[in-house]
Image (cartoon, helix red, strand yellow):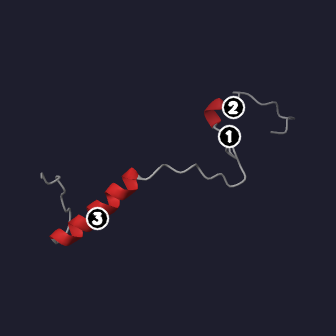
Amino acid sequence: MSTPDIRVEKGHAEPEEVAAITAVLLARAAAAPSAPVHRGRLKAGWRRLEREPGFRAPHSWH
């Protein structure tokens, strides 16, 4: 059995800790993706400035 290349960036991880985090990551990767959560809104509540028209009349209410 080959071992995956896992690198600890800071500190020292014991083999049991590396095995535990690997098991968690593999379980999350194998889980079915859940549906996105919408909290009452389906589109953004803000406007993108690059999509706005270049000129607005001074009397207009945007």
> Which residue appears at 32% of the width and 55% of the height?
26
Residue 19 visible at all: yes
Local SS, label 2:
loop
Q: Which mark is residue 47?
A: 1
Would you say residue 13 is visible in this rendering?
A: no
**Residue of label 3:** 21
Q: Which mark is in front, 2 or 3? A: 3
**Residue 5 percent location from the top left of the image:** 16, 52
Q: Amino acid at mark 2?
A: Glu
Q: Report whether 31 appears left or right of 7.
A: right
Where is residue 33 shown, x and y percent of the image? Answer: 49, 49
| CA gap, disc 2 and disc 1 | 8 Å
Instruction: For marks 2 and 3, give the CA distance.
Output: 47 Å
| Residue furthest right in the image | 59
Residue 34 location in percent, x, y? 53, 51
- CA separation, marks 1 and 3? 41 Å
Q: Amino acid at mark 3?
A: Ile
